[in-house]
Image: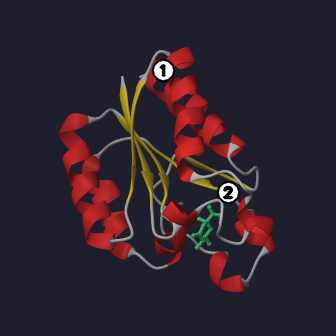
Amino acid sequence: ASVLVLNGPNLNMLGVREPQIYGSMTLDDLESMCQERAEQLGIQIDFRQSNHEGELVSWIQQARTEHDGIVINAGAYSHTSVAIMDALILSELPVVEVHLSNIYKREPIRHHSHISAVAKGMICGFGPYGYLLALDAIANILDRD
Ligand code: DQA
């Protein structure tokens, strides 16, 4: 099985961006961690990041035929983007949402996510480890169906 792991805006700045919230791990470190877990789970992952909403939408559209599932941390677009939500719906793929921080413990603007409405489930607050939980979850979903 092949899973698209999508990262939204500002996640390319992991490691330097508000480390008290997001930790010291870089996006490259996070990708290595995910690749290792993917190997253990026997799945392929395509790990990507973009700061552009339209690019994320295009990648999700392509995933419809190229991948079997999506793990997504849409960053701030989680709270704003109906376009990403619509793309996830049209992909017809199982979606697992992930956030590094516990969005419910933060400012009220972060408490609502458009992604959650279309995701199988959501993991937040566990830092980079949340990505491993998300990969476990998507592998389990793909195993089931
Ligand atoms: C985030 C939480 C969002 O509110 C924020 O805009 C991000 C990162 C997280 O991983 O905790 O960019 O998605």
* Number of numbered discs overlaid on the protein picture: 2
Q: Residues within 10 Å of mark 1 (few under 14, many from 20)?
A: few
Q: Earlier in the sequence, mark 2 or mark 1?
A: 2
Residue drawn 32% across the image and 56% down it: 89
Label 1 residue SS: helix
Q: Looking at the rendering, which quadrant does residue 100 occupy?
A: bottom right
Rendering coords of residue 87 (x, y %): 28, 60
Residue drawn 46% across the image and 69% down it: 9
Rendering coords of residue 116 (x, y %): 54, 60
Give the numbered dot on residue 79: none
Q: Looking at the rendering, which quadrant does residue 43 occupy?
A: top left
Q: Which residue is mark 1?
A: 144
Q: Which residue is mark 2?
A: 100
Q: Residue furthest front?
A: 16
Question: Looking at numbered disc 1 in the image, what kind of residue is underneath it?
Answer: Arg
Nearest the eye: 98 or 28: 28
Classify 87 as above or below 1.
below
- 43 relative to 128 in the view: left or right: left
| Disc 2 to disc 1, C-alpha distance | 26 Å
Residue drawn 49% across the image and 61% down it: 12
Quadrant in the picture for the N terminus: top left
Ligand 1 closer than 8 Å to label 2 CB: yes
Label 2 residue SS: loop
Rendering coords of residue 131 (x, y %): 61, 42
Q: Nearer the viewer, mark 2 or mark 1?
A: 2
Labels 2 & 1 near each other (Cβ < 8 A): no
Rendering coords of residue 10 (x, y %): 51, 70
Question: Looking at numbered disc 2 in the image, what kind of residue is underneath it?
Answer: Leu
Ligand 1, what quadrant?
bottom right
Nearest the eye: 68 or 27: 27
